[in-house]
Amino acid sequence: MSPSSISHFLSATTNPKMHHTFPLPPSLSTPRVIPISNFPLLSHSSSSYHSSSSSLLFTPQNSCLFLFLTPKISSFTLHAASSSVPDSKSDEPIKPTSTLIHNLHLGAMFGTWYLLNIYFNIYNKQVLKVYPFPATVTAFQFGFATLMINLIWTLNLHPRPKITGSKLASILPLAVAHTMGNLLTNISLGKVAISFTHTIKAMEPLFTVVLSSLLLGERPTFWVVSSLIPIVGGVVLASMTEVSFNWIGFSTAMASNLTNQSRNVLSKKLMTNEEETLDNINLYSVITIISFILLVPFAIFLEGVKFTPSYLQSAASQGLNVRELCMRSILAGFCFHAYQQVSYGILELVSPVSHSVGNCVKRVVVIASSVIFFQTPLSLINTLGTAIALVGVFLYSRAKRIKPILPKTKTA
């Protein structure tokens, strides 16, 4: 799943006006407008803008404040014009110590994100090599994540969302796409090398541009279209020389790109009502639970019940005993959920564009680590194609930051 797109499309807008209500004596019966200059200095603390805390001091010189008194209510409201409120502490310089701590914390989160991804891909590949039932494996990962989500809600580590019928109707198509995307990715991982699957998944930006153009009417800029050329060229070059290439692994990885990016585009098209939106962690949690409910009967229908002792024992003949298989499955399920949570935590601290750059670096780290761990043979042309595709993904993330130049309107 691509969390930066969901955050970009689903984050609820904040109200630019701040107000505070204070009780008044009931004896007031005539409307009056009193300038704030008649009152002592008022101090106010705000922490709702871009996750930053600001201590604001309102004075008649730096903010347009008035007290509006009406006879119909027994309170007055203090309004602050949004244009006069700074986004950070007024004239206080940022302390180098706090900046260093923030950067160290952010670096630690990125490192944890990458490490969890590495272990997930390695454990997942080890399980799929000896237990070739991707639908059952994916359902188990969704089920393990569902247990962790409910534990988080039960311990009040994150507020439990209230799901209405209209919210469920909006989330259901996203959950279907999420289910298919993860299932198709696991099918691909079971058929080809991890490095090749992630090289193909580098083509996600191409599907994003095409689907956004068809479904949302968004026109990509010249720089965005240009960045797609090295992505497509690199993937084609890597596919031509891939040792583990087979059409099932290639086509399912491509299909996972389509379903994952369809989820992201649909999230922007369907989840447009501010009242229906959830925060990113709860949205991911609800989607995961629905995906588990959807996939379990489908996995049984497609593969049958594969948790019997005979099927588990068959893994022992291929290098993993039952205990090792269960432990790696649990660890893969844990890493699958944990790296998603860390990813959303990072998204709260950085912009979606910075997150996408970090996601590009993550793909490089996963490919390199899997090649080293599994000793995957790579030719020079294959390595060059992978590198070109990943550079294209980086250029795409930079091109998305360039704003299109709007034509100037002629004034009379």
Image: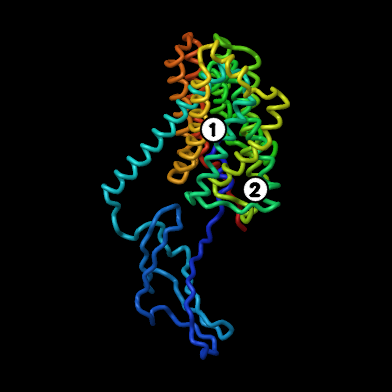
Q: Is residue 212 left or right of residue 59?
A: right
Nearer to us in this view, 353 or 276:
276
Nearer to us in this view, 197 or 37:
197
Mark 2 is surrounded, within 10 Å at the Cα level, by few (under 14), some (14 to 19) or many (20 or more) other residues, namely many
Residue under pointer 2: 271
Q: Nearer the viewer, mark 1 or mark 2?
A: 2
Nearer to us in this view, 340 or 4:
340
Which residue occupies 65% across, 25% down? 255
Mark 1 is surrounded, within 10 Å at the Cα level, by few (under 14), some (14 to 19) or many (20 or more) other residues, namely some
Nearer to us in this view, 407 or 231:
231
Q: Is residue 141 above or below residue 51?
A: above
Q: Is residue 334 above or below residue 200?
A: below
State the separation of the CA atoms marked 1 and 2.
Answer: 28 Å
Amino acid type of the residue tagged 1 in the rendering: Trp
- Report whether residue 129 is seen: yes
Residue 389 at x, y percent in the picture: 52, 22
Judging from the image, the colouring scheme is: rainbow
Callout 2 secondary element? loop
- Report whether residue 212 is seen: no
Amino acid type of the residue tagged 2 in the rendering: Met
Residue under pointer 1: 223
Which residue occupies 50% across, 79% down? 76
Quadrant in which the N terminus is drawn: top right
Residue 144 at x, y percent in the picture: 55, 35
Q: Earlier in the sequence, mark 1 or mark 2?
A: 1
Residue sticking out furthest to the front: 309
- Total number of numbered labels? 2
Residue 354 at x, y percent in the picture: 45, 38
Which residue occupies 37% across, 65% down? 56
Q: Quadrant of residue 242?
A: top right
Which residue occupies 51% across, 28% down? 332
Quadrant in which the C terminus is drawn: bottom right
